[in-house]
Image (tube, grey):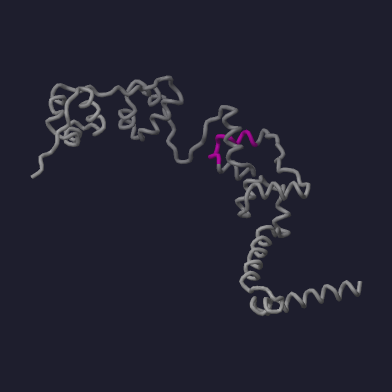
């Protein structure tokens, strides 16, 4: 034990002595090029820094998914998996907990993130369970739909229903897709004779502005009819 302790003290003293000297001095003692020695030191430093695992990092192996731990420790997922397997640590597999009657009663009563925090579960788990039971999602501050509003869904355009009841078009569309089988198919607006006469007489950009169409739509229609493009005259 005494000899081992002296050996460790001697090694520590040698390391401190080497650290105190420059690469040029160590190279002179070892009769090697200081540039080669400096390059060798940097390589060993990089390798040791990359491969060194702290006790804190080792304690996290197997306690969360490898991809999550890789982001947390800023290591590759392959390095995490290799280190875990080398230590014989099983892959993280969260235990499935059953839902109690009280927990199920909370679904749909509060927003999913709130319920997740109350139950100590993930938002995805709460959302998945709610969907499996056919429970609608709860939105705080959301005005509930009345029967009168639901009856008009699909019978009027979404924009008309939104303007009539003071709702957004997206909200009306989402509600229509949830409770009805009505699907509006957007029919392309037909070209009038007046609009067709403008093709080739004005630039595509100007025709698009006057007819309130996209420039690509104007260009495609002109090419379809074989009408040459108007080239503006240079002054």
Res. 99 image quadrant: top right
Q: Residue at x 24, y 34 (%)?
A: 215
Magenta stretch: give its range: 103-112
Disc count in the image?
A: 0
The reply to whether the magenta stretch includes residue 110 is yes
Seen at 35% across and 22% down, the residue is 185
Q: Along the horizontal axis of the image, is 120 left or right of 205?
A: right
User: Does 203 appear in magenta?
Assistant: no
Residue 140: x, y in percent? 48, 40
Give the residue at the far left of this rendering: 235
Seen from the viewer's position, the closer of residues 95 and 172 is: 95
Q: Is 229 placed left or right of 23 in the picture?
A: left
Residue sitting at x 22%, y 30%: 218
Residue 182 lies, in percent from the top left, at: 40, 20
Position of the C terminus by quadrant: top left
- Front-most of 25 and 1? 25
For this rendering, which residue is in front, 184 or 11? 11
Task: Say which residue appears at 60% left-offset and 37% top-offset.
Answer: 126
- Residue 219 in the image, given as x and y percentages of width and height: 23, 30
Indicate whether 109 appears above or below 185: below
Is 46 in front, or is 70? 46
In the picture, the quarter occupied by the N terminus is bottom right
* Residue 89 picture location, percent across and down: 76, 47
In the rendered view, would you say 159 is above or below 80? above
When asked about the image quadrant of residue 95, the answer is: top right
């Amino acid at each position: 034990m005494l000899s081992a302790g002296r050996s460790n003290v001697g090694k520590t003293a040698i390391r401190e002595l080497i650290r105190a000297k420059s690469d040029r001095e160590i190279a002179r003692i070892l009769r090697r090029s200081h540039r080669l020695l400096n390059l060798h030191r940097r390589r060993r430093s990089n390798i040791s820094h990359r491969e060194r695992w702290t006790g804190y990092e080792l304690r996290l192996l197997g306690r969360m998914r490898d991809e999550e731990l890789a982001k947390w420790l800023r290591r590759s997922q392959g390095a995490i998996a290799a280190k875990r397997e080398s230590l014989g640590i099983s892959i993280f597999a969260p235990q499935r907990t059953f839902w109690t009657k009280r927990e199920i009663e909370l679904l749909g009563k509060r927003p999913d993130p709130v319920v997740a925090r109350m139950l100590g579960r993930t938002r995805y788990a709460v959302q998945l369970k709610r969907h499996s039971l056919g429970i609608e999602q709860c939105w705080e501050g959301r005005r509930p739909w009345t029967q009168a509003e639901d009856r008009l869904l699909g019978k009027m355009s979404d924009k008309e229903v939104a303007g009539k009841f003071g709702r957004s078009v997206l909200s009306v569309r989402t509600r229509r897709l949830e409770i009805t089988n009505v699907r509006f198919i957007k029919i392309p607006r037909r070209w009038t004779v007046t609009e067709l006469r403008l093709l080739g007489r004005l630039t595509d950009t100007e025709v698009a502005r006057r007819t309130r169409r996209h420039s690509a739509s104007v260009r495609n229609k002109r090419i379809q009819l074989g009408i040459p493009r108007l080239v503006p005259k240079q002054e």
